[in-house]
Amino acid sequence: MDDMLSGPPAAARIADLRRELRARDLDAFILPRFDAHQGEYVAPHDERLAYVTGFTGSAGMAIITAETVAVFVDGRYTVQVANECSGPLFSRLHIFEQPPEHWLGAVAQAGWQIGFDPMHLPPGWFDRFAASAVQASATMLPQGDNPVDAIWSDQPPAPTGRISVFPMQWAGRSSAEKCADLAAYLSEQDAACLVETQPDNIAWLLNVRGDDVAFNPMPQSFLIAERNGTVTWFVDPAKLDDEVKDHLPDIVTAQPVSQFLGALQNRCNAGERILFDPDFSPVAVRHTIADAGATAAAVASILTRTKSVKNPVEIAGLHDCHLEDGVAWVEFSAWLAQTVPARAAAGEPVTEREAEAQILSCRQARPGFLTESFQTISAAAGNAAMCHYAATNGRNAPIMPQNPYLLDSGGQYDTGTTDATRSYAFGMRPDGYDRAYTAVFRAFHALATLRFPRGTQGHHIDAICRRPLWDLGLDYDHGTGHGIGHRLSVHEHPQRIGRPYNPVDLVPGMVVSIEPGYYEAGRFGIRIENIFEVIEESDGFLSFRNMTLAPIQTDMLIPADLSEDERCWLNTYHQDVLQRLSPLVSDAAGRWLSAATAPI
């Protein structure tokens, strides 16, 4: 990312893009961060939003007009966007409080032509923009090629990561079984076929993994699954070796990814019902189906839902990799506790990037570790108030004993995906920190220990987590929990815990994070995050079973503010961490672990 943004300054890039838009007779251009798969993480080739604006967050969008560049982000990135998109070139807006389609409808003039890339805009987004354009007497114009690509002279090439087989010993079910289930579902739905554009769903269905996008071990590809059980996989043939070809069931045929839309158009027949996901498909898919005379049925992908409920082999693999990850967390935490004060006293403080490299090194020493599962958030002092902060060569603060530190980090292992966050302090803390830290822990405990009936959805229980913070007039502007993949996406749909309505029942076998926090701009940020499995108890109620094994620092807790249940839960959790990790860590880390897990 640093290299990509080291070319012309943002002003020059924006000027180049405006010239390109004028050449295309466009008055505005909608630039989401999405690639053709509408995912959270994209390859360098697809970092168009960052190239044009300098905003490097993992979610957001911009609308470029002749007058301004409006950049829309959610609450996780309000501080970051102010830093990265400063100055009069930009309008910085909250994507929920000032929806981009409303903003565009207010500024667009009659006769405006508004460009968009139909491979990078989901149908729901397109519909909202199109409605605003109609109200403004403007026109939405799809672009056959992306205008950003036309000005990006040193754009990185499209990814060509190697595809590998994901063996049955880790997958738990064969690809042929999964494809047969999918064919049966299509028959039940009276659908001719399903169009799948989410790489993690395709990787799960075919029991393969890939290396196209950092942190996401899945190949970029598209797929059409037929009611008769056959599957066409659109993927770069250069990524396929003989082992993968031999692994694929006979019902699977591979074609070049460049043929996807053309093959879809030829495949569709008048009157047929074709399923596509309205939230995670490019609007080009819907347009192609409709243009061919078939019925485009907007239905959330069954693969998303099926993949989210882990089978026993997947659950066991996730527990195994969290054990290894716990060892890495303990080794790192012991190093941090000893090194930060010592290096600060010597006048050579530990930096954020050095700490980031250290947690990676600790993971690399563990069996089965492959790569990080997302860009580590290594954030000291006020940087921790940016929920998705990333240290860079030019932005690499020292970790000082008087300033708290936050680390949000995870790994991809042979058998699963991990993600955890811990907040650290090394002595003195800012005023108000302990009060907020205690409230965050109490919020975490409130949800981690919740029992709930079947039919419960994430938005039903979000407030239960926030209550201890709300009681103090505190809150956080991000979700409370997300699904996590099985050596797939660290943020996996469809389950999530948060304020927005999400009609997805939490069911046994789902895996979610619980991660409340609190942030004060310029001062500090606090977050505690573990991964939990949803389980069924003997009476039929559901609850969360912990997977993450890493001590929660107790120095910053105010004992008088904790209930007996909260103290008891933390002591029991720490005893479990101690017993399971002590035999696996180094002597020095073991001594730190014994002290860190001492009862409170």
Image: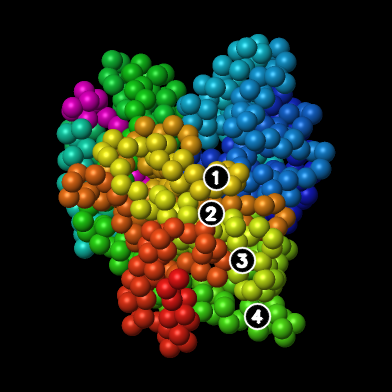
Q: Quadrant of residue 524?
A: bottom right
User: Mark 2 or mark 1, which is nearer the start of the sequence?
Assistant: 2
Residue 423 % position (x, y): 55, 64
Stretch in magenta = 186-202
In three-dimensional space, the C-alpha distance between marks 2 and 3, rounded to whole angstroms, equals 17 Å
In three-dimensional space, the C-alpha distance between marks 1 and 2, rounded to whole angstroms, equals 9 Å
Q: Identify whether 382 is placed above or below 201.
A: below
Q: Nearer the viewer, mark 2 or mark 4?
A: 2
Q: In the structure shown, which secondary structural element does the residue marked by tag 3 occupy?
A: strand
**How busy is the neighbourhood of tag 3: few (under 14 within 10 Å), some, or many (20 plus)?**
many
Q: Residue at x 17, y 50 (%)?
A: 538
Q: Quadrant of residue 304?
A: top left
Residue carrying label 1: 471
User: Mark 3 or mark 1, which is nearer the start of the sequence?
Assistant: 3
Q: In the structure shown, which secondary structural element does the residue marked by tag 1 occupy?
A: loop
- Callouts 1 and 2 close, C-beta under 8 Å: yes
User: Mark 4 or mark 3, which is nearer the start of the sequence?
Assistant: 4
**How busy is the neighbourhood of tag 2: few (under 14 within 10 Å), some, or many (20 plus)?**
many
| Marker disc for residue 341 | 4
| Marker disc for residue 405 | 3
